């Protein structure tokens, strides 16, 4: 009886989540290294529908099956009457792997990964995150840090720039300070990077589905450049409009089902004249 209400409500929840994803993408359209997320909807597998039937135990075969339970006057059984595919739900969001637009800045501390991979960074509590954003700067103590203050990790730990005046990053990711090599970017990739979890702006962290980080064998770095967000504003606006219209249509479905149910109850509950 309430199947229409359930399906309509499920559709509304899916579109609500879709709007959240689109809103987050649009909010980060100017975030360096941000990669938009895509909502993935899945339907429950088809399930068998059945009805409960009451059998008497006068049937001989049934008596043999029941054995010592013959004294029950009736038993209940289920008879399959068909199948039903349940409503869609949003199962997950995955990260788009499309590269962002290249912006050349000529700033020696701005670097971009040319190809696959992520920079490894560390917060003040020792937690490791990953990012495509190469907008770095010198920290108060001379360390190389992100725009938000996370420490950039090299193969030997945090990268120390000290008071160097001339900073240079070559195409393999080696960092030189006043002519001396002070470290090399720790670039990693993942077996399934689309399943990395977003932890705010351009920061990402590994998940069981993404797999453990694997070092990039041949790093490719472009100095004096940044990778911008890969979010396409026009595409996201189209998704937003589609989600809004689908939400409204699902809402009307719930309203209609509710009105029909109320009419049914009113009709059946009316005393006979």
Image: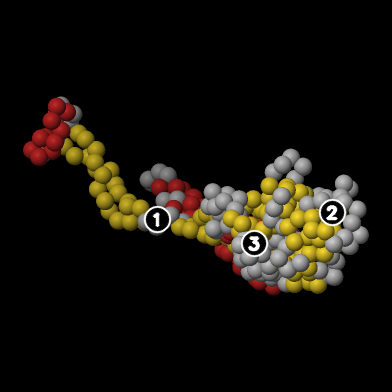
Q: In the orientation shown, which residue stands out farthest toward the left?
A: 60
Picture coordinates of residue 89, whole percent (x, y):
51, 55
Residue carrying label 3: 117
Picture coordinates of residue 5, whole percent (x, y):
49, 53
Residue carrying label 2: 161
Picture coordinates of residue 43, whole percent (x, y):
45, 57
Label 1: how many Cα within 10 Å (few below 14, some 14–19, many 20+): few
Q: Which of marks 2 and 1 is in front?
A: 2
> Considering the numbered disc 3 on the image, is that residue within a helix, a strand or a loop?
loop
Residue at 19% over, 39% down: 55
Residue at 26% over, 51% down: 80
Label 3: how many Cα within 10 Å (few below 14, some 14–19, many 20+): many
Quadrant hosting residue 13 = bottom right
Q: Nearer the viewer, residue 231 or 21?
A: 231
Asked if residue 46 can be seen in this view, the reply is yes
- Mark 3 and mark 2: Cα distance apart in space: 23 Å
Per the rendering, the mark at residue 45 is: 1
Residue at 13% over, 36% down: 65
Quadrant hosting residue 93 = bottom right
**Is the C-beta separation of discs 2 and 1 under 8 Å?**
no
- Mark 2 and mark 1: Cα distance apart in space: 56 Å
- Mark 1 and mark 3: Cα distance apart in space: 36 Å
Residue at 71% over, 65% down: 172
Q: In the rendered structure, which disc, 2 or 1, sits on the residue that comes first in sequence?
A: 1
Side of 23 where 18 appears, left or right:
left
Q: Which of 11 and 165 is in front in this view?
A: 165
């Amino acid at each position: 009886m309430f199947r229409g209400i359930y399906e309509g409500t499920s559709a509304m929840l899916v579109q609500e989540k879709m709007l959240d994803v689109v809103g987050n993408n649009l909010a980060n359209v100017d975030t360096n290294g941000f990669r938009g997320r895509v909502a993935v909807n899945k339907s429950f597998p088809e399930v068998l529908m059945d009805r409960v039937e009451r059998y008497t135990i006068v049937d001989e075969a049934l008596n043999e099956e029941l054995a010592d339970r013959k004294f029950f006057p009736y038993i209940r059984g289920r008879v399959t009457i068909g199948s039903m595919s349940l409503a869609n739900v949003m199962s997950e969001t995955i990260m788009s792997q499309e590269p962002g637009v290249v912006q050349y800045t000529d700033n020696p501390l701005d670097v971009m990964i040319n190809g696959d991979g992520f920079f490894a960074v560390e917060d003040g509590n020792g937690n490791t995150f990953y990012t495509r954003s190469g907008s770095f700067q010198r920290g108060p103590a001379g360390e190389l840090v992100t725009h938000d203050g996370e420490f950039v990790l090299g193969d030997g730990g945090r990268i120390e720039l000290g008071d160097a005046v001339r900073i240079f990053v070559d195409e393999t990711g080696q960092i030189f300070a006043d002519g001396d090599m002070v470290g090399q970017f720790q670039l990693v990739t993942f077996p399934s990077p689309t399943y990395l979890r977003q932890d705010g702006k351009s920061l990402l962290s590994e998940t069981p589905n993404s797999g453990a980080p694997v070092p990039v064998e041949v790093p490719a770095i472009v100095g004096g450049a940044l990778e911008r967000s890969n979010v396409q504003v026009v595409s996201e606006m189209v998704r937003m409009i589609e989600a809004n219209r689908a939400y409204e249509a699902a809402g009307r479905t719930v309203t209609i089902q509710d009105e029909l149910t109320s009419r049914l109850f009113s009709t059946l509950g009316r005393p006979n004249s």
